[in-house]
Image: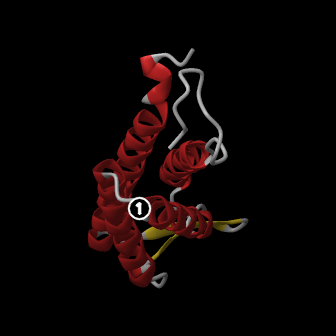
Amino acid sequence: MTQPDEAQLPGRQRMLAGVLLAGAGLFDAISGVTDLSNDQYVVFTPEGIYHVDVVDVTGWMWAHMATGALMVLGGILLVSGRRWSIRFAAAVAVGGIGLHLILLPFHPVWAVLVIGLAVATLVLLVRCRRGTPRGEVNPTGRPFR
């Protein structure tokens, strides 16, 4: 027999995925804002450590902020329950993972944090998408929706 908690599980997973994705987007946007104001990096070489102002990553940080905004939007849409929001959130999470893999050398801890949240979101979204095939009925005799 299906328990009430089991029937609400996909909705809860979707809500948790939305919160995780919005949290990852918020972290991403904060990182982008802080990096726009300070884009000074240090280069380690065998001859010593050099302070480099030549490396300009401002364009990447704007991409960081845009990805963060899209992640927050995807998380909000997931919580709202729109049917197409799962695909949008999955696409945004994959884009965020790709961007953070590129930016991993600049901010390793921050990138790993956001990648972990995005991967957790994708796992929850895949579990939400898996459903019972149409035509089957649950133990109470009602068809699955």
Residue 80: % across, % down: 28, 52
Vertical relation: 6 (above or below) 130:
above
Rendered location of residue 44, percent (x, y) = 63, 64
Q: Is 59 or 116 nearer to us in this picture?
A: 116
Q: In which quadrant will I find the N terminus?
A: top right
Task: Examine the rendered structure and indicate whether residue 95 appears above or below residue 18.
Answer: below
Instruction: Compare residues 26 and 112 and report the one nearer the observer.
Output: 26
User: Residue 113 in the image: x percent, y percent?
Assistant: 50, 46
Colour treatment of the image: secondary structure
Residue carrying label 1: 85
Amino acid type, residue under disc 1 in the picture: Ser
Residue visible at 31% across and 63% down in the picture? 73
Q: Nearer the viewer, residue 73 or 105?
A: 73
Residue 58, visible in the rendered structure: yes
Residue 19 picture location, percent across and down: 35, 43
Crowd around label 1: few <14 · some 14–19 · many ≥20 (10 Å): many
Q: Residue at x 55, y 63 (%)?
A: 100
Is residue 31 among what the camera can see?
A: no
Side of 32 where 108 appears, left or right: right
| Quarter of the view holding residue 25 | bottom left
Q: Which residue is drawn at 64% across and 41% down?
A: 132
Q: Quadrant of the rendered structure where residue 69 is?
A: bottom left
In the depicted structure, whether residue 33 falls above or below residue 15: below
The residue lying toward the viewer, choosing from 78 and 36, is 78
SS of the residue under disc 1: helix
